């Protein structure tokens, strides 16, 4: 990518940040309301462990590490989750808003990726203080990796997680070229992803056969995998394999998004003239 192209998309990123700053109160409200289900999950696991001896483990997790899992998951989710991008992309297609973008020297996928990145930057900035205060209020001890390699792999996996989530959402939004309303498809995928990615519980408490099956799907790499790296649950050869599989799914999702965009444009041109 040339310097001119980098500068162009840098301007898109800046404009996206400025636009999202206008809605920072909405971000704050979303963060505060997201703490409600997080509180419920922490209370649930404290109740589950309450009648067990202090050294009890569930799926290899002592109570403190189980609680820490959800806090780290909340952080990763703030950094990587797609919120309204898929809806906005589908609306651009349905309402014909992509017409003026097609006439400009902009790659729509890269354009939307810059807007997604700007939204994550603002959301994470807004979420930082409430989440920090929440951690202090709940008294949940945080695990801090001491190995620099763990930090590097964790940050790398978080970046790959964000890309994977965005590309999959972009590909799903491309259905707007063929159907009038994509909300049903988005809800179906989101419902399955919520469970299979580790939002509801750590995936390594599942039976080994089911864990092995999920490990070859993209879903664990949308949340569980980076959290497991941070907590030291995934190390060594398993870590290297996981990063390789996660990279594979990012490239596959990118290719699918590109393919769906170009196929959709052919249909869009045929219909729109």
Image (cartoon, rainbow, N blue to C red):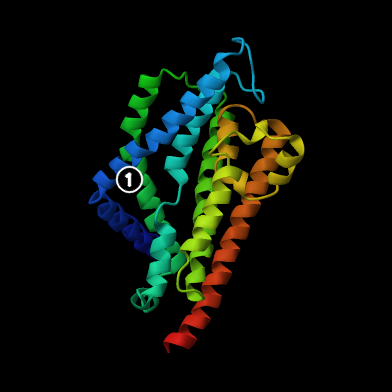
Q: Residue at x 41, y 65 (%)?
A: 89
Q: Residue at x 54, y 45 (%)?
A: 194
Q: Is residue 145 above or below residue 191?
A: above
Viewer can see residue 2: no
Depth check, front residue: 155 or 120: 120
Viewer can see residue 176: yes
Q: Secondary structure at mark 1?
A: helix
- Quadrant of the rendered image containing residue 232: top right
Q: x and y percent of residue 56 in the render?
A: 63, 15
Depth check, front residue: 40 or 246: 40
Quadrant of the frame with the C terminus: bottom left
- Quadrant of the rendered image containing residue 138: top left
Residue lying furthest right in this view? 209
Q: x and y percent of residue 96 in the render?
A: 37, 77
Q: x and y percent of residue 114 in the render?
A: 40, 57
Q: Residue at x 37, y 57 (%)?
A: 115
Q: x and y percent of residue 25 in the render?
A: 24, 44
Give the residue pinned by disc 1.
122
Residue lying furthest bottom in this view? 273
Depth check, front residue: 46 or 171: 46
Residue lying furthest left in this view? 22
Across the whole image, how many numbered discs are drawn on residues? 1
Task: Give the class, few, some or many, for how many residues have Cα within 10 Å of label 1's Cα (few <14, many ≥20).
Answer: many
Q: Is residue 201 above or below residue 89?
A: above
Q: Residue at x 52, y 20 (%)?
A: 47
């Amino acid at each position: 990518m040339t310097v001119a192209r980098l500068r162009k998309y840098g301007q898109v990123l800046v404009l996206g940040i400025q636009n999202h700053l206008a809605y920072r109160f909405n971000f704050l409200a979303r963060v505060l309301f997201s703490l409600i289900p997080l509180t419920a999950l922490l209370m649930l696991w404290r109740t589950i462990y309450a009648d067990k001896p202090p050294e009890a483990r569930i799926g290899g997790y002592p109570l403190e590490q189980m609680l820490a899992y959800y806090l780290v998951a909340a952080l990763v989710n703030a950094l990587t989750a797609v919120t309204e991008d898929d809806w906005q992309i589908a609306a651009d297609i349905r309402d014909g808003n992509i017409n003026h973008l097609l006439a400009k020297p902009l790659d729509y996928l890269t354009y939307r990726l810059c807007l997604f990145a700007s939204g994550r930057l603002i959301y994470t900035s807004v979420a930082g203080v409430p989440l920090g205060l929440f951690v202090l209020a709940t008294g949940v001890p945080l695990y801090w990796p001491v190995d620099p390699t763990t930090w590097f792999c964790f940050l790398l996996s978080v970046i790959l997680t964000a890309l994977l989530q965005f590309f999959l959402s972009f590909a799903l939004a491309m259905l707007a070229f063929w159907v009038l309303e994509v909300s049903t498809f988005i809800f179906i995928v989101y419902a399955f992803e919520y469970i299979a990615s580790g939002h509801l519980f750590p995936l390594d408490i599942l039976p080994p056969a089911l864990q092995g099956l999920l490990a070859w799907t993209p879903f664990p790499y949308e949340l569980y995998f980076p959290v497991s790296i941070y907590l030291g649950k995934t190390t060594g050869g398993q870590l290297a394999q996981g990063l390789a599989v996660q990279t594979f799914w990012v490239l596959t999702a990118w290719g699918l998004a590109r393919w769906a965009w170009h196929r959709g444009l052919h249909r869009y041109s045929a219909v729109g003239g």
